[in-house]
Image: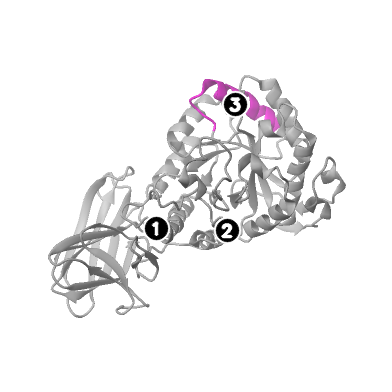
Amino acid sequence: MRLLGFVLVAAFLASASPGAADAAVRPTLERLDVPRELRVVSYYPADAGWTRMWEPWRPQRLAADLRRLRGLKANTVRVVVPAHFFGYPVPERPRLARLAAFVGLAAASGLHVHLTLFDWWGEYQDVAGSKRWARAVLAPYVGDPRVAFVELKNELDSADPAAVAWARELVPWLRDYLRGGTPVTLSVGGAEPVRDLRALVAALPARARPDFFDAHYFTGGGEPAERVFAALRDVAAPTPLWIGELGYPTTTARSGYWGVPRTPSSQEAAQAHFLRLCFTALARLGLPPPGVWILDDFAPGAIPESDVDGRDEQYRFGLFRADGSQKPAASVVRRLFGGRSETGFNGGFEASVLAEDGTPVPALWGSAGELRLVRDTTTARSGRASARIVGPTDRSGRFHVTPVTGPVRRGRAELSAWLRGHEATIRVGLAWLDADGRRVGWSWVSVPAGNRWRRAVVRARPPAGAAYAQVVIESRRLTGSAWVDDVAFSWR
């Protein structure tokens, strides 16, 4: 994004009133190339989700949050407009003034706005009322580059004939109303995005297709993301595709990664890994960076009564905790939005998290069996730490992690690991999994560990049906001590 200049006007920091936006000097932003240049983070205040964002009106709080969001190297903030709360089919002028003030606050922080319409609304038979409401909301922003694009409806139900018929009518009308200068999109949900997008594309004639399709992705740990994104891209073609919501909840009630501890530190590390996997997959496919859901965790009571307010995971998608402190994922997104590549998977065991009993264990690594992988700062081949395999004598255990570059590609995969120990034989391998997480093959090498560090290497081509590789370390019938360090994975 190229910021030409902006002026922060005191009117935006006071309670908005009708005409406030017109009276103020507009900050000037240069139009983005959408979706290619988008760097979007969705936003609600941590203590006021959905409709509660707008009442009571707290412009100082919003301005501070938007500056923090801009600090992630984002160039666009997503704001969602609840139709009935704003007034339908005739929006209330004070609500429209607050939306205008929000757009101004965003621009003052150097942010465009991704505007999502018709939230918490479903009167699809009322086409005339829909147009009347949308016209009133959007009238101040026709031709305004501060609004990067307009999302007609969040996660349209492509199985609902009335919703699809409404979209067929509204998409071309909205594009015409915006004079073709502001892109229009529609999104599908994150549970079955390929299925839902395929149904939506099939139901929309060429004239009713949006300028780009928006798909959301919240599935598991992100290991099959590259396959899913490739399928979405192909389904959308020739219309461009953007992944508009991407997120991983740091709840301890469940985990997207099997075998990792269900502790706050472990799940926060898993969130960062999920984002690395998905951003890397999109870059490899030539697709734009995704939109991230969401800036902050929600505080208790912040979500109004709805189908999500009682679900713990819905409160834990933030890049920041509800108290404003930063999770590891915030730094990762800042680097990724800044164009950096993030392909590490803690193969040197430098990053640790706490297990349920408080023991420091390597971040991202899952485990199964009766042995345990712990982080050891007294022994290392390089860096400050290694992973030590510990547990009852004569027992077995298996430890695994999915590399960021694990999705299958041409050539051979190469895995290497350095091992040390006595009276221990360790197997190092690659588990090959399909897009549904089912194992379709193994590639192993066994190494008797000695008192010096020894390198184990696995080179293998993926079997038919494999979607990604998982690194596996296994010890069977451990009778001594064993350490692992400097695990690396690449394609040759």
Q: Is residue 160 above or below residue 398?
A: above
Task: Identify the disc placed on residue 323.
Answer: 2
Magenta extent? 156-176
> Residue 122 has which mark?
3
- Residue where numbered disc 1 is placed: 263
Q: Earlier in the sequence, mark 3 or mark 2?
A: 3
The image shows residue 221, relative to residue 237, as above or below, that is below
Q: Nearer the viewer, mark 3 or mark 1?
A: 1
Q: Quadrant of residue 86?
A: top right
**164 vs 269, nearest the viewer:** 269
Q: Secondary structure at mark 1?
A: loop
In front here: 345 or 296?
296
Secondary element type, mark 2: loop
Whole-Å distance between the Cαs marked 3 and 1? 39 Å
Which mark's residue is nearer the viewer, 3 or 2?
2
What percent of the width, then of the height, locates residue 382?
A: 34, 78
Toward the viewer: 188 or 350?
A: 350
